[in-house]
Image (spheres, rainbow, N blue to C red):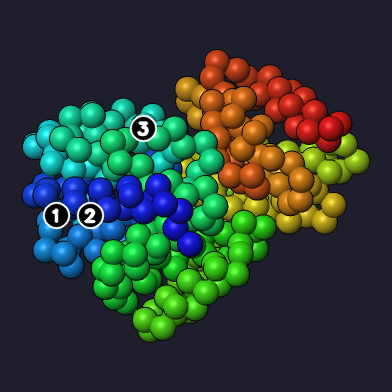
Amino acid sequence: MIISNIKEEINKFKIAIDESNSIAIASHLSPDGDNLGSITATYGMLKNLGKNPVFILDDEIPKSESFLPYINSFVNPKDIKNKEFDLFISLDCADLQRMGSNIKPFFIDSKKTVNIDHHSTNDFFSEINIVNVNATATCEVLYDIFTSLKYPIDKNIATSLYTGISSDTGSFKYDSVKSKTFKIAADLLMYNINFNEINVSLYQSRSKEKTDLLIRALNSIEYYHNNQIAIVSTTIEDFNKTNASKLDSEGIVEFVRDIEGVEVAILLKEKRDSIRLSLRSKSFVNCAKVASQFNGGGHIRAAGGTFFELSMKQAKEYIIETVLEEFDK
């Protein structure tokens, strides 16, 4: 069920599309399944509506999402000559900063802006904001938008929407999943999407480089609070030694979370100018709340943040201390 104020925003969204000739779409840096699923679904829908959207991407595409329709239609922001769009659609992005410094100017210079998301930390940074924090994924929000406006869904769009929902629910394992989630998934399967290709690509195609990085990360594992907290790290040296890409750290924190008895899994990823934090929990720790204290946010069971000007040792001490506070409540 779409709540009334979102219905109003959806109507504004339709009018904005109808009145726009040049439309840009983008999401946050470090793309994931819901990020790219929502972009490619929107790209396909706009193409079907007779528009010529510009899919802006300033990052690498993970191999696990390389099968998505329209995925190679992206344009690097440095190659865009027109700086002003009639409409800019932000997808799966809780705040403007998450787009990155190379995409943010396009958003600011656009005549009209739309923000479509499901994160509880969303700060409603657009003129039109379609944010449903009860949705499991931005692709679920898009499904509601498309069906509400009676925009036809085809096989390509269904593939992208299903991928985003499956990815952001941990293959339907997270407690954000509701009966509606399965009803939407069942409907999308009716479009004859390649269910096996999606599952193999997302969950059964780990490269040797990614596997080697996982092994190095697991060798760093430390346990706290009666083994209920597990923390691992990846260093720049780890990436160099394994020839892994920066996206190959995806999935490590989930692997650690799945250890029996672990409530909270923490991954600290060393970068040249910062340390990236990833958090996952099983039952009661609010990852978004913890991450919000470290320049981040996300979902209750999955969130991320960033440490600046700290050593790996200092970052580890801060995050362990903060997570321990959640166990004392």
Residue drawn at (39%, 64%), measured in percent from left and top?
A: 143
Q: Nearer the viewer, residue 252 or 303?
A: 303
SS for callout 2:
helix
Residue type of the residue flagged with mark 2: Lys
* Distance from Cα at disc 2 to Cα at disc 3: 19 Å
Please report contact status of discs 2 and 1: CB closer than 8 Å, yes or no.
yes
Mark closer to the chain start, 2 or 3: 2
Tell me which corner region of the image, top left, top right, bottom left or bottom right, holds residue 146: bottom left
Q: Residue at x 59, y 25 (%)?
A: 294
Amino acid type, label 1: Asp
Which percent across, then down, holds residue 162?
44, 68
| Along the viewing direction, whichever of 47 and 131 lies nearer the viewer | 131
Q: Quadrant of residue 230?
A: top right
- Closer mark to the observer between disc 2 and disc 3: 2
Q: Residue 210: horizontal and vertical position, in percent?
A: 54, 53
Task: Decide if residue 85 is in sight here.
Answer: yes
Q: Position of residue 267 (x, y in %)?
A: 64, 39
Give the alpha-carbon distance from disc 3 to disc 1, as whole Å. Answer: 22 Å
Q: CA distance from mark 2 to mark 1?
A: 6 Å
Where's the C terminus, which quadrant? Answer: top right
Residue at image mark 3: 125
- Marks 3,1: beta carbons within 8 A: no
Q: Secondary structure at mark 3?
A: loop
**Direction top: furthest residue:** 309
**Which residue is under mark 1?**
18
Q: Which residue is mark 2?
A: 14
